[in-house]
Amino acid sequence: MSTDLHWFKSSYSGNQGECLEIAIPQTTSLPTIHIRDSKTPNAPTLTVTPATWSAFLPYAATYGSDQPNPQ
């Protein structure tokens, strides 16, 4: 399924290859967001709802990859 998706990453991402890429299919009746690791594009992907993605974004913006997990 992921071969039919157009993947992109944030313009804030560098070229280090340590980024998340997302794809939003245009042909599905249920809105979904597909997420993958840019280092391993052929690995399994994670599929979430737009609500889950929206809840994740503030966390990522606050803690990013350089911050400790706030657990």
Image: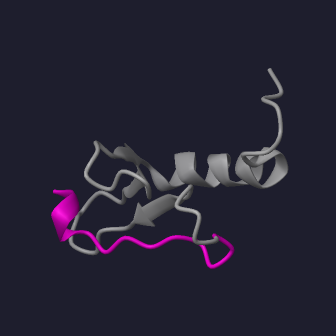
Q: Which residue is more in the foreground, 55 or 29?
A: 55
Q: Is residue 71 above or below residue 33?
A: above
- Point out the image quarter for the N terminus: bottom left
Kindly identify the residue that appears in the image at 21 percent across and 72 percent down: 27
Asked whether, in this view, residue 11 is left or right of residue 42, the answer is: right
Q: Quadrant of residue 34?
A: bottom left
Dominant secondary structure, magenta: loop
The spot of residue 53 in percent (x, y) is: 55, 52
Q: Is residue 8 above or below residue 44?
A: below
Kindly identify the residue that appears in the image at 37 percent across and 70 percent down: 7
Magenta residues span 1-13
> Seen from this angle, which residue lies furthest top?
71
Q: Quadrant of residue 10?
A: bottom right
Residue 4 highlighted magenta (yes or no): yes
- Point out the image quarter for the C terminus: top right
The spot of residue 18 in percent (x, y) is: 56, 55
Asked whether, in this view, residue 24 is left or right of residue 51, the answer is: left
Q: Which residue is more in the foreground, 13 or 61?
A: 13
Kindly identify the residue that appears in the image at 44 percent across and 73 percent down: 8
Q: Is residue 4 above or below residue 68?
A: below
